[in-house]
Amino acid sequence: MKKNISYLVLTLFFVFIFSVFYIGLEKPNFYTPKIINNKSLEEFNSTELFSNKEFNSREIIKNNKFTIINIWSSWCAPCRLEHSALMKLSEKTNLNIIGLNYKDKKTNAIKFLNELGNPFSKILIDPDGIISISIGAYGVPETFILNKNSKIIQKYIGPLTNDNILEILKIIE
Amino acid sequence: MIKLFKIILLISILILSFQKILFAKNNSLLVDKISKNLRCLICQGQSVYDSQSDFAVSMKLLIKNKIESGESEDQIYEYLKNQYGEWIVYDPEFNKKNLILWIFPLILFIFGGLLIYRKVFIN
C-alpha cells in the first residue's frame, strides 16, 4: 500500500515535470516587447531640426487633443517604408505629428525629407538616442499616440502599416 | 613664503584632479555594474553591458547621465522597470507569477533532506 502511494506520487511528479516542460516548449520563445499603455510620457527638452530652437515636450503636446510622436532616422530602412503612411496621415488629418530624429545627421535627415516629403509639424533631434530611451522606446521606427495630458494611448513598435493608420484614425475620431 | 604658497597650491590642484579622476572612475564602474544587470531588449541573450547595439549604447549613456545627476542605483532600476517593464532587469522580483519557481527548489531541498534523514537515522 505504502509502495503504491509512493509510486503514485512519483508518477504524478514526473507527469507534472513533463507537462511543465512540454508547455514551455510549445510557447514561442521569441520575446515580443510588452506595450505599456496609459503611462505618462517622460518629459524631455530637445532642439528643433530646422530652427535649432529649444522645445519642451509637454509644451508641444498640451495644446493638441492628440499628438503623435514618431521616432525615425534617415538611415533606417523601415522608416522609409512607413513614411508614405505618415504622409497619408498628415494629409488626411490636422494631427500634431512630432518627429524625433534618432541618431541622425542633419544633412541626411533633410535630404530624406526632401525626397519623401515632410509629414511632421515639428522635428526634434535626439543625437545620442537618450531621449528615445528615456521615453521607453526600443529603436527606430516607433510611434506613440498621446493625449493632451501626455498619456500614451497607443504605441507601435516597428513600421506603421495601413491597418495601424486606420486604427489611429479611429482613435482620433 | 611664496614658495610655500606655490607648493600648497600645487598639492591642492593635484588632490582635486585626482579626486575628479577617481570620481569619474567610480561612476563608470557603477555604469558597468548597472548595465550588467540589465537585459538588452533588442538583442538576444545579451546584457546592456555586452551589447554594442544602438539601444544599449544609448542606455549606457542614459545611466551615466542619471548617475551624474545624483540618482541612486535603485532609482535607476525603478525608472527603467517603469519604462520597459520588469523584463529589463535580470533579477526577477518575487511575485505570484514566479512563486513556484522560487519555492520549488526549497521544497525539493527539504523533501530530499527528510528522505536522507529517514534513511540514515530511522532505518
Image: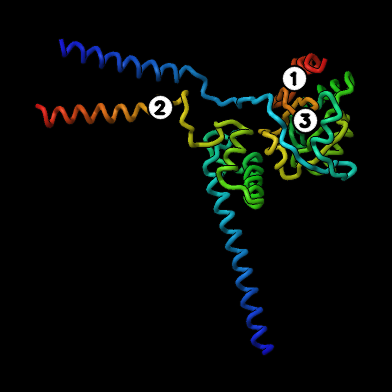
| Amino acid type at image mark 1 | Thr
Badge 2 is on which residue? B101
Residues tagged 3 and 2 counted as in contact (Cβ below 8 A): no
Q: Are marks 1 and 3 on the same chain?
A: yes
Badge 3 is on which residue? A70
Q: Nearer the viewer, mark 1 or mark 2?
A: 2
- Residue A52 visible in the current orientation: yes
| Amino acid type at image mark 2 | Leu
Local secondary structure at mark 2: helix
Q: Nearer the viewer, mark 1 or mark 3?
A: 3
Give above or below for B4 relative to B103: below
Residue A103 % position (x, y):
74, 42
Q: Which residue does the image show at 63% across and 75% down from the upper left? A: B12
Classify 10 Å Cα crowding around label 3: few (below 14), some (14-19), many (20 and above): many
Residue A30 % position (x, y):
55, 25
Residue B80 % position (x, y):
61, 37
Badge 1 is on which residue? A161
Name the quadrant containing residue B43. Answer: top right
